[in-house]
Amino acid sequence: MIALIAEFLTSLLLIVALALRRWRKWTVGALLVLKVAVAVVMLTYGFEFALRPLRDLALLAVAFAFPQRQKLLVVAAAAAFVLDLLLPQAIPQWTAVALFAVVGLLTVLPVRRWIAPVALVVLAGLGVAVWIPASATPTTMNMGMPAMPGMAMRSVTQLTGSPTTGPVKKITITAVQNGDRYSFNPSEIHLRQGDVLDATLVNRTPSTPVTIHWHGLDVPNAYDGVAGITQDAVKPGGSFEYRFQVNQVGTYWYHSHEDTKDEVVRGMFGLLVVEPRTGPVADVDQALSIHTWGDKLSFGDNPGVQIRPVKAGSSVRVRVVNTDSEVDSVHVTGSPWQLAAVDGNDLHEPGELTDQTVPIGGGGRADIQLTMPNHPVRVSLVGEDSPAYVLSPDGRSTVDASAPGPEVDLMHYGRPAPVSLGTNYNRDYTVDLDQGIGASGFKWTMNGGVFPDAPMLMVSEGDTVRVTFRNLSLGEHPMHLHGHEVLVLSRDGVASAGSPVWLDTVSVQPGESVTVAFKADNPGIWMDHCHNLGHAKIGMVMHLAYTDVTTPFVVGDGNNPE
Ligand code: C2O
Ligand code: CU
């Protein structure tokens, strides 16, 4: 983050320094030192990310050598800066470098004065012309693989899972609208591990197409609920049956994956808890959503303080589900506690925590476990007037929130345990998260592309896959892969040394790079997207596709997954 900001600031300062008539030696000296530092940090991301600072250093060098071409250099620096802001890294790295190379040449060569600015404009125009069409959204698009000669292809509709044997839980989930607000009825589902969920979605809204995506559950692809990829959106009056065995335990949620940005924000979601076959994990087990209704941040549907009577000595599990787009942090006052699970996955030998906070990215979950003392305990969201859930032995008394402490460091929390994944990676991908101005305004990009044109990650069934997310943008991105759990290997080069951390939604901070790995053991076409729903809406969506899977559905034409 700091390197990114330093990079923009020093580029800006460079323009100012060049523009000043008699630029002082110390300004240039300071800039030089800063730029070198930025270049070194950027080199740790990879050579291509150091191109911008290196380009600026070259610009400084030429400015020294040819002071008489100062005006031209100011224009070049400004043009490069504007391009950096407009285009995702993948493109300006090269356009801006090429642009500067030409400017350098023109500076040295005795050409006519007007040629240089004209060359600049043409080059900058070319860079924009390459990127803008790439960021335009086609009206319809099929996300399946073209059939390869001699290869047996499977359709997502055939990927319904292996025959199921567990007890069947048959339910109907009705989608309804109440004024501005949507909801699924029921809005909370409790299952036991091994249950077969047979859920029929019935759309009773007057005019809103919906689907159900089971966030975090590794369901067979046919039941993943993504409009235009695994099914058509269910029209008002229509229905769709989801049927799969639930093999995971933990805290999950379900939400519409049609026009997600609008529908989830307005309430088209529910919470889903899977208990072990052997029964509840605590005497008191409570799932709470974090959701902003209108402009009110609510915790468990309540913008204020809720009190729940809990007997001293009871074991308590509070399952926090962030259904919002931005990161929210929870903390506990009044009792030591453990972070028992993240994204539904138990942590191994989680240590005792006191004043620490747990940040939960959009779509993520955190399970808090504690033993009830004989005085109140407050689970609250960090921030002013933040809503809270108070556990109270007498059902009345509360406790004020203490000052939130440092964030729990998941790379060093709990104890290591063996994982079955192995370290032999058949595929190794890097996904750059970035930003730029596209055909229809501002875009969040993945590897220089926007949905549905962002390049796919291709895998074959059985592959072990490693993915590194590099966040080169100025926003936080909770990256959610459907149908799989990913193991966090490292964050910013720091290897995971505590409990294995398996996630379905990985929060990547600005300037951070996070490496994860997973087993490609669930064939299909799976969304891999930012769960900041506003970001997904304007481009930050790609797919993980198994090489032999096709889909009869198309994005567009009534199916708008984001
Ligand atoms: Cu929680 Cu693609 O979604
Ligand atoms: Cu994002």
Image (cartoon, rainbow, N blue to C red):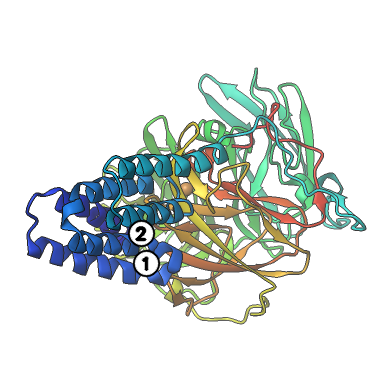
The C terminus: image quadrant: top right
Mark found first going from the N terminus, 2 or 1: 1
For residue 485, above or below residue 473: below
Q: Quadrant of residue 114?
A: top left
Q: Is mark 2 within 8 Å of ligand 2?
A: no
In the rendered structure, the answer to whether residue 364 lies left or right of residue 103 reads right
Residue at figure coordinates x 73%, y 53% from the top left: 219
Residue at figure coordinates x 47%, y 61% from the top left: 470
Q: Residue 67 versus residue 324: which sits nearer the camera?
A: 67
The N terminus: image quadrant: bottom left
Residue 378 makes an appearance in the image = no
- Tag 2: Cα neighbours inside 10 Å, few (<14), some, or many (≥20)? many
- Determine whether the residue tagged by mark 2 lies in a helix, strand or loop: helix
For residue 535, above or below residue 479: above
> Which amino acid type is marked by label 1?
Met
Residue 52's disc number = 2
- Tag 1: Cα neighbours inside 10 Å, few (<14), some, or many (≥20)? many
Residue tagged 1: 42
Residue 162 makes an appearance in the image = yes
- Determine whether the residue tagged by mark 1 lies in a helix, strand or loop: helix
Q: Are marks 2 and 1 in contact (CB under 8 Å)?
A: yes
Q: Residue 185 versus residue 133: which sits nearer the camera?
A: 133
**Could you say where residue 378 lies in the image, as x and y percent from the top left?**
35, 54
In the rendered structure, the answer to whether residue 481 lies left or right of residue 432 reads right
Residue at figure coordinates x 56%, y 28% from the top left: 182
Residue 163's disc number = none
Distance (Cα) linking label 2 and label 1: 9 Å
Q: Quadrant of residue 183?
A: top right
> Which amino acid type is marked by label 2?
Arg
**Could you say where residue 374 lies in the image, as x and y percent from the top left?**
36, 62
